[in-house]
Image: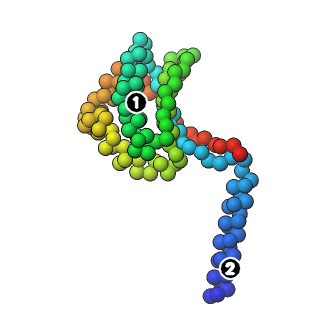
């Protein structure tokens, strides 16, 4: 039994040393995780959509930041070359992948405070579809180069 225990301890030490060695070999460390949403406003509706972004959307993001749910957010204008490319890009920066664990439960009270009821929030989403289209979203992770 002692022999097995010694081998397990040795194996554990070797695995720990290997993990440390592997980290030192990588030329980067894992950084924050960023959600990127591509939006295309409908013709003549850019300013109308930006009113929402500068109002309700901004209030919501600021509340998420105060609660420590996100690190930051950004709003970017893009110059599309065709109708299938965004003219607005929204980003939300999270500390790491673990920030997504139980995220909806943590965001729900903030959303209720900013948007009102779930029904009001859903109606707002339907109304925004009249002025913009979500083209897609992706989640990426920044790699910090050493």
Q: Which residue is mark 1?
A: 58
Q: Calculate the distance from the C-alpha at mark 2 to the C-alpha at mark 1.
A: 56 Å
Tell me where residue 7 appears, x and y as whole percent: 68, 79
- Disc marking residue 7: 2
Above-or-below relation of 36 to 30: above
Q: Residue at x 63, y 82 (%)?
A: 5
Q: Residue at x 72, y 50 (%)?
A: 26
Above-or-below relation of 79 to 73: above
Mark 2 or mark 1: name the one nearer the start of the chain: 2
Tell me where residue 81 appears, x and y as whole percent: 57, 16
Q: Quadrant of residue 48?
A: top left
Question: What colour scheme was applied to this rendering of the protein?
Answer: rainbow
Tell me where residue 36 appears, x and y as whole percent: 51, 33
What count of labels does the image hold? 2
Circle 2 SS class: helix
Q: Residue at x 73, y 59 (%)?
A: 21
Tell me where residue 90 appears, x and y as whole percent: 48, 30
Q: Is residue 104 visible?
A: no
**Residue positioned most to the front:** 66
Q: Is residue 121 left or right of residue 73?
A: left
Question: Foreground residue, 58 or 27?
Answer: 58
């Amino acid at each position: 039994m002692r022999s097995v225990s010694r081998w397990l301890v040795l194996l554990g030490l070797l695995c720990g040393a290997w993990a440390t060695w592997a980290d030192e070999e990588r030329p980067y460390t894992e950084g924050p995780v960023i959600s990127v949403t591509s939006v295309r406003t409908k013709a003549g509706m850019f300013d109308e959509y930006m009113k929402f972004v500068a109002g309700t959307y901004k209030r919501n993001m600021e509340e998420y930041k105060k609660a420590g749910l996100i690190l930051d957010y950004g709003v970017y204008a893009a110059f599309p070359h065709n109708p299938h490319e965004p003219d607005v890009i929204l980003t939300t920066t999270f500390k790491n992948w673990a920030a997504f664990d139980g995220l909806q439960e943590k965001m729900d009270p903030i959303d209720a405070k900013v948007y009102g009821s779930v029904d009001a929030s859903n109606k707002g989403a339907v109304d925004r579809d009249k002025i913009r289209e979500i083209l897609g979203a992706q989640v990426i992770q920044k790699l910090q180069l050493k």
